Amino acid sequence: MYIHAGNNRMIRTKSIIGVFDMDAATMAGTTRDFLRAAEREGRLVNIKEDIPKSFVLTDGGSVYVSQISATALVGRAGALFDGADR
C-alpha cells in the first residue's frame, strides 16, 4: 500500500519508519543536523509546494519533506490499514 504525501508523491507504507511534525522535531538541534546531512547526501526529497509541515523517514534512508501535516499523513496510513499489520 501507498500513501499520498503531497505533490503527486506516493510513499510505500511498508518502508515508512516515522512521520514527524516539522515544527516540533526541528526544535532539537540534532534533528536539524540530521535534515541538513540528508540534504547534503542527496537523501532529502522535497515534495512540498508550500511551507513544510512534516517529514517522513523511510527504511531506505530517504527523507521526504511534505506540506501535509504529520497528523494527516498518519491518518491516511491508518485509514489504509485500520489496525492491520503492515
Image (spheres, rainbow, N blue to C red):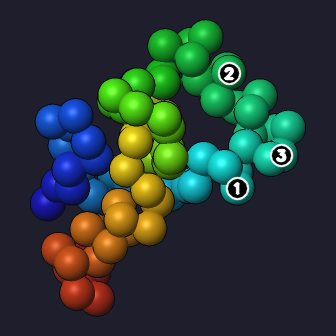
User: Which image quadrant: the N terminus?
Assistant: bottom left
Q: Which residue is mark 1?
A: 24
Q: What residue is drawn where x is 48% and y is 22%? A: 43
Kindly state the secondary structure of the residue where label 3 is placed. loop
Q: Is residue 64 visible?
A: no
Between the residue at mark 3 and the residue at mark 2, the CA separation in whole angstroms equals 13 Å
Q: What residue is drawn where x is 44% and y is 56%? A: 69
81 with respect to 26 (left or right): left
Residue 57: x, y in percent?
48, 45
Which callout, 1 or 2, points to the residue nearer the camera?
1
Q: Nearer the viewer, residue 13 or 4?
A: 4
Q: Which residue is mark 3?
A: 28
Between the residue at mark 1 and the residue at mark 3, the CA separation in whole angstroms equals 8 Å
Which callout, 1 or 3, points to the residue nearer the camera?
1
| Disc nearer the start of the sequence (3/2) | 3
Disc 3 and disc 2 in contact, CB within 8 angstroms: no
Between the residue at mark 1 and the residue at mark 2, the CA separation in whole angstroms equals 16 Å
Kindly state the secondary structure of the residue where label 2 is placed. helix
Dot 3 crowding, Cα within 10 Å, few <14, some 14–19, many 20+: few
- Which label is found at residue 36? 2
